[in-house]
Amino acid sequence: MVEPVYAPVVGAAKVLFKVLDLRLDVRGSQYVPRKGGAVLASNHIGYLDFVFAGLGANPAGRYVRFMAKDSIWKNPVAGPLMRGMKHIPVDRAAGAESFRVALEALKDGEVVGIFPEATISRSFEIKDFKSGAARLAMDAGVPLIPTVLWGTQRIMTKGRDKDFSRGKALSITVGEPIEVPQGSDLDAVGDQLHEVMRGMLDDAIARYPQQPSGPDDSWWLPARFGGTAPTLQEATRMDRLEALERARKKQDQG
């Protein structure tokens, strides 16, 4: 399939990776099917995760159509690129349409990327999952591919300044496919996916070749590993407070 937008964007991204001297460690790409549909489920720790999660499928010759919030499509620069790469906009107030588009793409043999946590994890741990990834895989009759990123939060993430300094290590790990037969218990599949990805994340952190340069640089390491990132419980509370504030502002504007 000719990709007049996606292919040049991938090429430009690879040039940028070299300019930034990113130390990429890509593992498990053989688990991405070379043809046919698949749901690629990734953790979410930074704003550029769709770029790096997609890179995990690149050795298999696949382009991933990511589901992402529709506000990105309103950006004058990012919007045309998202449309050209055939990513799938998600309106959280009307999710049925994005689900339908994603399901159609899967049945057409595409790889659809989804972040089951829905929003960036402030703790950099694996948050609770929404059920969409498992449901898509079951309804389309395609495998669910667990994918874990580590290090992307050091470039651009929620609540921190961008940092494009050179030499950062980034880990992209693709796990073995999870089959989701018709009639599966989606809660059980979600729990399985969560457990698998949590183990993959622990492994990625354990083998990560770089450490914080000092106390002020330990923000990107989870508290469980000695860093100063919020705990999963603290981050959940912060997310809830943010959601309440967002709802209040929306009500005031209405």
Image: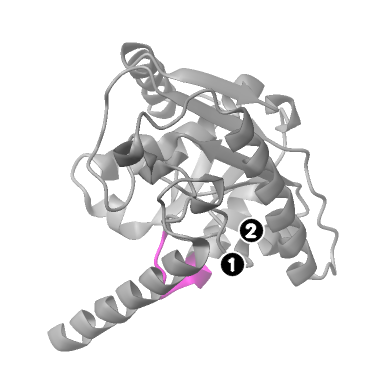
Which corner quadrant holds the N terminus? top right
Task: Please report the residue visible at 37 percent of the width from the left and 17 percent of the height from the top.
Answer: 167
Q: Which residues are magenta?
A: 90-97
Which corner quadrant holds the C terminus? bottom left
* Image position of 168 (left or right of 181): left
* Farthest-out residue, left: 253
Task: Please report the residue visible at 27 percent of the width from the left and 41 percent of the height from the top.
Answer: 78
Question: For the residue marked with disc 2, what is the amino acid?
Answer: Ala
Q: Exactly how many numbered labels are in the figure?
A: 2
Give the numbered dot on residue 15. Answer: none
The secondary element bearing badge 1 is classed as loop
Nearest the eye: 182 or 122? 122
The secondary element bearing badge 2 is classed as helix
> What separation in Å lies between label 1 and label 2 (alpha carbons)?
7 Å
Q: Which residue is mark 2?
A: 133
Q: Is residue 38 magenta?
A: no
Q: Which residue is mark 1?
A: 130
Q: Is residue 61 visible?
A: no
Q: Are marks 1 and 2 in contact (CB under 8 Å)?
A: yes
Question: For the residue marked with disc 1, what is the amino acid?
Answer: Lys
